[in-house]
Amino acid sequence: MAEKKIRTIGVLTSGGDAPGMNAAIRAVVRRGLSTGLKVKGIYKGYSGLLNEEITDLTGKDVSDTIERGGTILYTARCAEMRTEEGQQQAVEICRKHGIDGLVVIGGDGSFAGAQKLANLGINTIGIPGTIDMDIACTEYTIGFDTAVNTAMQAIDKVRDTSTSHERCSIIEVMGRNAGYLALWCGIANGAEDVLIAEKYDYDEQNLINHIIESRKKGKKHHIIVNAEGVGHSEAMAKRIEAATGIETRATILGYMQRGGSPTCKDRVYASMMGALAVDLLAAGKTCRVVGYRHGEFVDFDINEALAMQKNVSQYMWEVCDSLSHNYDKNETSLKR
Ligand code: ADP
Ligand code: F6P
């Protein structure tokens, strides 16, 4: 892509919100201003862009936002942006408002929109913002740390009552098709079982056998962390209760995982990524997505980033499994 000098940048948040998005917006605004750029905030993602919900942002406009969850620019999903007409219109609106550089904070879908705008001549940079951590080019996405801590704390609480009642508890965590939130909670909460779409073989009888054996060995609770990608926790709870005779309850954590004040890690990573996005635009770069890899903040071509695959670490999965199953080889095997 040809490098082009820019004067005014826009920033929007798109797709599901994530704690830390405000820290990223703040960084874009303040780094932009300090680089001599004008900064415009675009409300409600691509939808607000197409409706021209655009305003100038000052450094003061982002005061008192770094500690707040959600996104002060609001977010939306926008079907029109998937069409060529919508993308052409978005470019015309950017030009009308003098926006020659755009920072898009969101997930892969949002980056696909940014890629289309880049192809049509608007310099764009993506920042990974999603609690799902499912963006292949980066080891970290804004919001994951807060969300996984929120889920971990909630699961600790369910565990207390599960133990008191000697129940089996299935706790469903978000993540869309990706099992990162579930796997991390599985390890952090010491769950007896973790079900993620990437690894679960859907052999429910095996799971039931495990619950029964575990109870025979004196376990007072049985915590199953179930990823959204596997889902159907309520129905699963009914089947497990019928098969084992052990009271089983399902808890779907839901949207609470997307809210709350961002952790230090989310604030710092979001600030670094926001600043890097502006630095790339100021250097005339376009069609890039920023990320974090091997201890560094880096950037990739969006086309390459979208083509990358991300897999759950086999080693992490094995460690998770070995800490909840078969850890004492002298005991009767808890075969899965
Ligand atoms: P996320 O960014 O979290 O992956 P979505 O997949 O819902 O969330 O995408 C957010 C928005 O990005 C969509 O509502 C749409 O406006 C835009 N988008 C998604 N895919 C494309 C695409 N292929 N082309 C253009 N815009 C897209
Ligand atoms: O991408 C974040 C996420 O919370 C996923 O974990 C979940 O599948 C999805 O968004 C829910 O989206 P919505 O806000 O449209 O219900």
Image: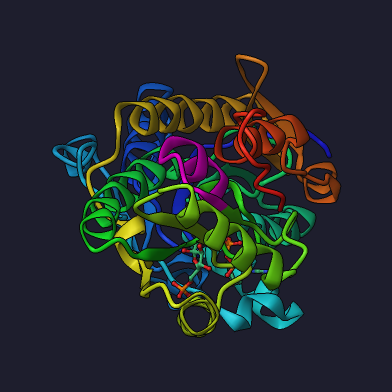
Residue 131, percent across and down? 47, 51
Question: For the point 72% across and 42% down, which residue is it?
Answer: 312
Q: Is residue 296 above or below residue 175?
A: above
Residues drawn in magenta: 182-193
Residue 7, percent across and down? 51, 37
Q: Of 203 and 87, which appears nearest the observer? A: 203
Q: Is residue 128 above or below residue 249?
A: above
Question: For the point 34% across and 31% down, which residue is it?
Answer: 267
- Residue 83 lies within the magenta run: no
Q: Using residue 179 as the reference point, say whether residue 152 is left or right of it.
A: left
Quarter of image, res 263: top left
The answer to whether any part of residue 104 appears in the image is no
Q: Of 304 and 80, which appears nearest the observer? A: 304
Q: Of 14 and 48, which appears nearest the observer? A: 14
Q: Is residue 111 above or below residue 300?
A: below
Q: Using residue 87 as the reference point, say whether residue 161 is left or right of it.
A: left
Q: Of 238 and 304, which appears nearest the observer? A: 238
Residue 180, percent across and down? 58, 47
Quarter of image, res 280: top right
The answer to whether any part of residue 276 appears in the image is yes
Location of the N terminus by quadrant is top right
Question: For the point 20% across and 38% down, which residue is it?
Answer: 67
Question: For the point 48% across and 69% down, which residue is it?
Answer: 49
Residue 101, percent across and down? 57, 45
